[in-house]
Image (cartoon, helix red, strand yellow):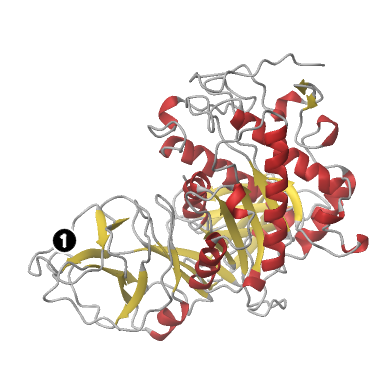
């Protein structure tokens, strides 16, 4: 089949274009170029590339700071790209960091930076890379632990070439980006790529349609170039020096405005900000959900994404937060929707945070302070330990604030607006053993910075990898009801997920039948069958969604 497609005028805003998503175009063509995500109009990689990707996925394991495999190590998952990428990855990261079914040894870092398009990021001397290095170090990861990345990029400047030339130029810049990533992160095994969402509500020639749609071909052709054996993108050690990670499609994000895709995805005008370019909460949520579903289900992610036996993921929100204002030293700012930071003699703003960790099961393998910022941070925030946990959110002021350790936990770095700054605090938490942890946030920047507070709906949180609380499960048969009956010791939780699989591996449980048990008993009716073996996983999870 051949689709006859007319490119929409790039300077005219519209709620749809008539363009067909690549995932539905198949062997049809756009301006003579075949659709699909992979060669032949397919949406899945060809067998050889699939096998290479699965081999790369098998190498994604916890590693120590030097990069050696270590059961007590970490896996870094990095999001890179521009401002839109930072906003969308933020939603994915914040959701994934509360997903108790994912691998707690997986540390997510938002490395995307506002204002940095593909042409800048392709330059190894661009400041993008030093900021990225600082963010990784602040999160207590080494370059050798970064093993997976998600990339969403586009040009920051107006492309002067027509299609297909601008898409080919973007392909070449992203090729240089993945080579730079591999050179900086030697254990980087997999890169998943996505492209822009719908741009048709904008009348900007550099962000409208069909430009956003056409960036999908840049990703398609880049992956196709690696599949064809380009040595400058080689990821197969059997074929020579490895200079790039294995490249695969992540979730395909484009949909034709108000016209539903086959999976129902649309982008309405209210899904984007007033500039019609950046995602508003609606589009951020849609992309974040697509990312979360993808990483939880793709065959190349399941083994390293799934929860491991030894460590639980625990996310703990701040129980108190407040701004300290030097200009009004006797005033309390503990119930505001934002937390404010600024340097400046007589005008300094600081933030206090307190976390209750009394219910945690033991010392953490890793602890990440995860924040939500409303504006570009410029420099900061940086975190400091506060030994005195006795301050009260409702009464604390600059004058009576507890003493702050002058030594920062990690150097400060910049973060893009509406993203998710993170700071590793593992050693600080491990040394503070009274069940409470207080931190102060400071900055050396003179411009106002705002973080979202717990009153604002997105509280600062600690994301922890803590020792697993093991449940002792007793199993017995109930022939009268053709049932397997499971009972277990209570952990004080309000509910449990019970997964049933026909094998014991993470891959088996990725496809498990999941049901919810409100108490410490579960009757698996109809499960008894001669010759059938079942494997069960019981996870404390709270009430069902």
Q: Quadrant of the N terminus?
A: top right
> Viewer-proximal residue, 481 or 188?
188
Q: In this view, does 305 lie above or below 481?
A: below
Horizontal placement of 203 versus 259: left or right? Answer: left
Q: Is residue 512 visible?
A: no
Q: Could you say where residue 258 lies in the image, as x and y percent from the top left? A: 52, 21
Horizontal placement of 376 versus 218: left or right? Answer: left
> Viewer-proximal residue, 532 or 63?
63
Q: How many numbered badges does the structure rendering display?
A: 1
Horizontal placement of 441 versus 133: left or right? Answer: left
Q: Is residue 5 visible?
A: yes
Q: Is residue 284 above or below residue 120?
A: above
Mark 1 secondary-structure assignment: loop
View extreme (bottom): residue: 431
Q: Could you say where residue 291 lies in the image, as x and y percent from the top left? A: 59, 45
View extreme (front): residue: 160
Residue drawn at point x = 18 percent, y = 72 percent: 345
Residue drawn at point x = 37 percent, y = 73 percent: 357
- Provide the residue designation for mark 1: 333
Residue drawn at point x = 61 percent, y = 30 percent: 211
Q: Could you say where residue 14 lies in the image, as x and y percent from the top left? A: 50, 18
């Amino acid at each position: 089949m051949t689709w006859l497609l007319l490119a929409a005028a790039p300077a005219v805003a519209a709620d749809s274009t008539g363009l067909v998503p690549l995932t539905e175009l198949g062997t049809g063509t756009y301006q003579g170029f075949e659709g699909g995500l992979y060669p032949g109009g397919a949406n899945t990689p060809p067998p050889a590339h699939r096998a290479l990707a699965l081999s790369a996925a098998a190498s994604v394991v916890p590693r120590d700071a030097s990069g050696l495999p270590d059961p007590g190590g970490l896996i870094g998952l990095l999001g890179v790209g521009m401002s839109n990428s930072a906003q969308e990855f933020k939603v994915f990261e914040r959701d994934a960091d509360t997903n108790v079914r994912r691998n707690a040894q997986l540390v997510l870092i938002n490395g995307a930076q506002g204002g940095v398009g593909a042409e800048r990021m392709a330059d190894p001397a661009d400041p993008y890379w030093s900021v990225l290095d600082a963010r990784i170090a602040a999160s207590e990861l080494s370059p050798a632990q970064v093993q997976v990345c998600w990339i969403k990029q586009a040009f920051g400047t107006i492309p002067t070439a027509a299609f297909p030339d601008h898409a080919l130029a973007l392909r070449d810049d992203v090729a240089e980006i993945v080579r730079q990533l591999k050179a900086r992160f030697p254990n980087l095994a997999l890169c998943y790529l996505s492209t822009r969402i719908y741009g048709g509500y904008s009348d900007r020639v550099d962000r409208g349609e069909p430009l956003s749609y056409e960036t999908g071909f840049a990703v398609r052709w880049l992956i196709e170039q690696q599949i064809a054996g380009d040595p400058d993108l080689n990821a197969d050690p059997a074929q020579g020096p490895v200079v790039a990670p294995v490249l695969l499609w992540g979730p395909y994000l484009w949909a034709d405005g108000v016209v539903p895709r086959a999976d129902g995805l649309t982008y309405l005008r209210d899904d984007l900000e007033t500039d019609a370019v950046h995602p508003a909460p609606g589009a951020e949520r849609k992309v974040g959900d697509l990312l979360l579903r993808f990483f939880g289900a793709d065959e190349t992610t399941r083994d390293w994404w799934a929860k491991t036996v030894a460590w639980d993921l625990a996310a703990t929100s701040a129980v108190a937060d407040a701004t300290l204002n030097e200009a009004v030293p006797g005033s309390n700012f503990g119930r505001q929707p934002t937390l404010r930071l600024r340097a400046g003699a007589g005008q300094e703003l600081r933030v206090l945070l307190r976390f209750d960790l009394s219910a945690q099961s033991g010392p953490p393998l890793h602890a990440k302070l995860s924040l939500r910022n409303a504006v570009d941070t410029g420099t900061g925030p940086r975190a400091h330990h506060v030994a005195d946990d006795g301050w009260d959110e409702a009464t604390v002021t600059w004058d009576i604030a507890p003493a702050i350790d002058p030594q920062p936990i990690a150097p400060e770095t910049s973060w893009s607006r509406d993203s998710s700054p993170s700071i590793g605090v593992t050693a600080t938490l491990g040394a503070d053993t009274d069940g409470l942890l207080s931190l102060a946030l400071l900055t050396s920047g003179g411009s106002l910075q705002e973080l979202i507070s717990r009153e604002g709906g997105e509280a600062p949180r600690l994301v922890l990898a803590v020792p697993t609380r093991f449940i002792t499960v007793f199993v017995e048969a109930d022939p009268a009801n053709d049932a397997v009956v499971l009972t277990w010791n209570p952990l004080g939780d309000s509910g449990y997920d019970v997964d049933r699989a026909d094998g014991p591996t993470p891959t088996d449980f990725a496809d498990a039948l999941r049901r919810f048990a409100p108490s410490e008993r579960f009757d698996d009716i109809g499960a008894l069958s001669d010759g059938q073996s079942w494997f069960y996983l019981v996870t404390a999870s709270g009430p069902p969604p």
